Each structure stands twice: as C-alpha cells, then as structure tokens.
Amino acid sequence: MEFLKKAYFFFLDTMQTVLLAASIFLVIYIFLFRPFQVSGESMFPTFKNHEYILTNIISVKMNSPLKQGDVIVFKAPTDPDKDFIKRIIGLAGDTVYLKEGFVYVNDKKLDEHGYLDSDVRTYGGSFLKEGEPVVVPQGEYLVMGDNRPYSSDSREWGFLKKQNVIGKSFFVYWPVTTMRLVQNPYK
C-alpha cells in the first residue's frame, strides 16, 4: 500500500512539472520567441539551409520599430502558408532604386559589405526595375535576400506589409557549431 501511495505522489509531481514546463514553453512560444528553420539559399551566406534561428515576436507585437538591416521573418506575400526570411532594405518614406547592379536608398549607395561579397550585384525584377525609383509606402517595407541572384524578394513581388511581419531574427542556435547572434550591420 505504501508503494502505491509513493507512486501516486511521484506521478502527481511529475505531471505538475511537465504541465508547468509545457505552460512556460507555450507562453514563450506564443508571446516572446519563436524558432524557425531556414529553408533554401536566399539568405546565403548569412544563413545556411537548415539552420535554426530564434525570432523575437514580442517586439513586433509591441510596435518596436524595425530598422534598415534587420533580418525579419514574415508571411510570404506569394503564399501566406509559407514564412520567408529577408533583410530590410527600405523603410516607409525611403526612395529605393537599382543602378549598375547596386542598391541606392535615398540617393545614397547602400553599403552592403557587412553581409554581401564585393562582387555581388543586385539586378531588378518584375517590380523593382533597374533605374526606376520606388517610394516605400507607410506601413510597408522593401526587403531583399542576401543571396541576390537566388532570392524571391521585393524586387519580384513588391512591398511587404507590416502586418505580415512575424518577428525579428536575433539568434542562430542550430547547428551548435554555427551558434551566433544575428547582427544588424547598420547599428
């Protein structure tokens, strides 16, 4: 009888611990940070295929301003069931254009040496064409992948609406050998 009593209390303690851990995980997952897996090469070399990143979702929900150079996760404009990861290039009110393979924001050539090799060129697409400036509307962003030749981004499908942003990526945690903070090169 004593054994059954001890087993019962052990089971209760274990269930309480599991439920508490699950509750804490759900609060963190729903309100604070969410893991995402990088799928594809559109952000190479910054992120590699199959890396896992943590994304801060609370800052977006609290309307913390996103900045040029931030890496964000968002609902894909072309397929809302998918999530994309890209870098913010243009903010609301910015004039962005492409000239001779380089990105210009507000008539200044964008310094992208912090995340692009010097030989990488950025060419236009269906939406953002070479030499044709666009002004980013209020509540929207212009985003691009770091692997410019292989990225589906604002050059093809246009501006990203703020309400489609899930969060700002801040930490690569898997694989462990590539663990690092995600830096904004413009800070």
Image (cartoon, rainbow, N blue to C red):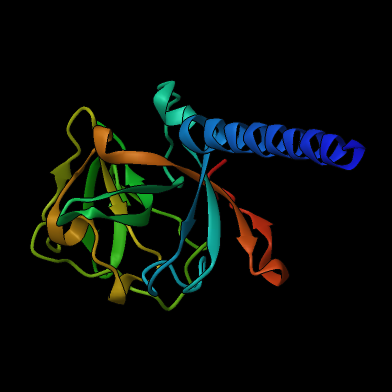
Q: At x 60% / y 38%, what residue is drawn?
A: 22
Tell me: residue 30, above or below residue 182.
above
Name the residue at the top extreme: 62
The quarter of the picture where the C terminus appears is: top right
Residue at figure coordinates x 23%, y 29% from the top left: 139
> Is residue 18 or residue 142 the one in the foreground?
18
Q: Say which of 47 and 26 sits in front.
A: 26
The percent position of residue 167, horizontal first and vertical second, equals 42, 40
Which of 20 and 125 lies nearest the eye of the viewer?
Answer: 20
| Residue 73 horizontal/vertical position (percent) | 39, 49
- Residue at far front of view: 1
Q: Is residue 118 left or right of residue 99?
A: right
Quadrant of the drawing holding the N terminus: top right
Residue 128 seen anywhere in this rendered image of the structure = no
Q: Is residue 132 left or right of residue 168?
A: left
174 with respect to 102 (left or right): right
Q: Is residue 137 visible?
A: yes
Relative placement, left or right, of 122 versus 57 is: left
Quadrant assignment, res 20 = top right
Residue 12 occupies which quadrant of the picture?
Answer: top right
The percent position of residue 2, horizontal first and vertical second, equals 91, 36
Count of numbered badges drawn on the protein:
0
Q: Is residue 129 above or below residue 67?
A: below
Q: Is residue 1 above or below residue 130?
A: above
Q: Is residue 143 above or below residue 42?
A: above
Residue at image position (49%, 72%) is: 50
Q: Position of residue 71 (x, y in %)?
A: 45, 49
- Asked whether 91 or 119 is in front, the reply is 91
